[in-house]
């Protein structure tokens, strides 16, 4: 193989490796939290929570989340699904790439204390 062709192959291979590593360095990680009546999935593509009502019990599922912003302040909140049994709603955010997002699936029990999954899940934006 002549020298210019070999140099071109090395350059193209190196560029492909650089692109692969640059993309992987900012890749997020999805996660799921669930309990009876509620399933929550975090999708790092678009920083979306999808909250699903998984029981025919009349109670509303929701996600409770916490996120430490780049400036060190805490962002927390909840998103409820009121659309009925067997449905899902999606809620988008703009978290800083590479930052952890903690969340837990819960059920809003109007006549009693709410219930949440035992452990919080962690996704990466």
Image (spheres, rainbow, N blue to C red):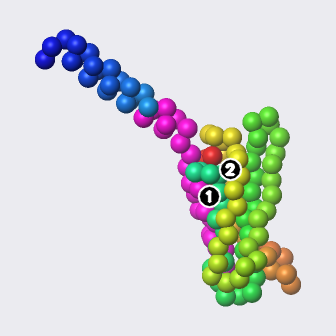
69 over 17 or under it: above or below = below
Mark 2, mark 1: which one is toward the viewer?
1
Label 2 to label 1: alpha-carbon separation:
9 Å
Decide if residue 119 is in sight here.
no
Element marked by disc 2: strand
Q: Earlier in the sequence, mark 2 or mark 1?
A: 1
User: Extreme left residue here?
Assistant: 1
Element marked by disc 1: strand
- State left or right for residue 2 relative to residue 39: left
- State left or right for residue 111 relative to residue 94: right
User: Extreme top residue here?
Assistant: 3
How many other residues sit within 10 Å of disc 2, few (<14), some (14-19) or many (≥20)?
Answer: many
* Residue 77 located within the stretch drawn in magenta: no
Residue at image location 48% in from the left, 38% down from the top: 24
- Location of residue 77 in the rendering, given as x and y in whole percent from the top left corner: 80, 58
- Location of residue 112 in the rendering, given as x and y in whole percent from the top left corner: 85, 81
Q: How many marks?
A: 2
Residue at image location 80% in from the left, 53% down from the top: 76
Decide if residue 64 is in sight here.
yes
61 over 49 or under it: above or below = below
Residue at image location 76% in from the left, 70% down from the top: 80
The quadrant of the image that shows the N terminus is top left
Q: Mark 2 — residue? A: 101
Q: Mark 1 — residue? A: 42
How many other residues sit within 10 Å of disc 1, few (<14), some (14-19) or many (≥20)?
Answer: many
Label pair 2/1, CB-CB below 8 angstroms: yes
- State left or right for residue 83 relative to residue 26: right
Write down the region rendered in magenta: 20-43
Displayed quadrant of residue 91: bottom right
Residue at image location 63% in from the left, 71% down from the top: 39
Nearest to the observer: residue 122 or residue 118: 122
Nearest to the observer: residue 61 or residue 48: 48
């Amino acid at each position: 193989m002549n020298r210019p062709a070999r140099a071109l192959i090395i350059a193209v291979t190196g560029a492909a490796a650089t692109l692969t590593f640059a993309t992987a360095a900012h890749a997020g990680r999805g996660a799921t939290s669930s309990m009876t009546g509620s399933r929550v999935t975090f999708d790092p593509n678009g920083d979306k929570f999808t909250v699903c009502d998984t029981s025919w019990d009349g109670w509303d599922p929701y996600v409770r989340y916490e996120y430490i912003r780049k400036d060190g302040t805490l962002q927390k909140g909840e998103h409820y699904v009121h659309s009925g049994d067997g449905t899902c709603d999606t809620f988008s955010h703009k978290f800083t790439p590479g930052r952890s997002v903690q969340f837990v699936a819960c059920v809003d029990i109007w006549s009693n204390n709410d219930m949440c999954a035992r452990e919080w899940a962690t996704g990466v934006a």
